[in-house]
Image (cartoon, rainbow, N blue to C red):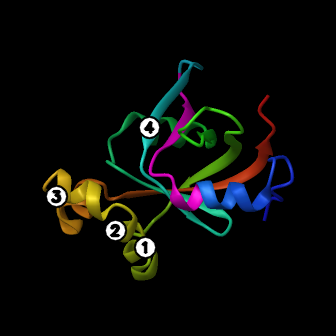
Amino acid sequence: MVQLDESPSAERTRDLLRRRKIVWFATVHPEQKPHIVPVWFLWDQDAVYILSQPGAQKVKNLLANPKCSLAVDDSENGHQPVAMDGIASLEPAMLSEELLDRYFVKYREMLAAMNWTADRMVSEYSRVIRVMPTRFLKVT
């Protein structure tokens, strides 16, 4: 597990990763340019999980290069964001039932606003990306 020692507060970092709904996910396009998109995510102790459509550009990018970065801020004033580099893997199976339950509790209101069910989400966003942080970045 990577230490959260580069952030202003390890507990604050964990809290942001648990509570925030959107993380900016950057991958490397095959043309060696950055590709960055906002995604829903789940933080689970030492990894970030992202559900993606299988044909998404981010998935194609990760097939060629697993290096990535993620960033989330406090969404109030942009101070003390949490940023990390990581290595992503495309998981062979859907999230465990326990992780899926936590994911759908986190996004219940957003799914309802879109008139989506959990089943539809899992059907359309069936590719699981697991990001293991390699370092937390001090952003100044």
Residue extending farthest to the left is 115
- Quickly name the residue at label 3: 116
Instruction: Examine the rendered structure and indicate whether residue 67 appears above or below residue 34.
Output: below
**Which secondary structure, mark 4?**
strand
Spatial CA span between label 4 and label 2: 18 Å
Look at label 1 and name its amino acid. Arg
Q: What residue does disc 4 label?
A: 38
Circle nearer the N terminus (4, 3) = 4
Q: Which sits in the foreground, 54 or 41?
A: 41
- Secondary element at tag 3: loop
Disc nearer the start of the sequence (2/3): 2
Q: Do the residues labelled 4 and 3 touch (CB within 8 Å)?
A: no
Mark 2 burial class by Cα count in 10 Å: few <14, some 14-19, many 20+: some
> Which portion, as a residue range, is magenta?
17-30
Q: Residues within 10 Å of mark 4 (few under 14, many from 20)?
A: some
Q: Say which mark, if any, is on residue 102.
A: 1
> Where on the picture, by quarter, is residue 112?
bottom left
Residue drawn at (43%, 73%), measured in percent from left and top?
Answer: 102
Query: Residue 74, image x and y in percent?
Result: 59, 43
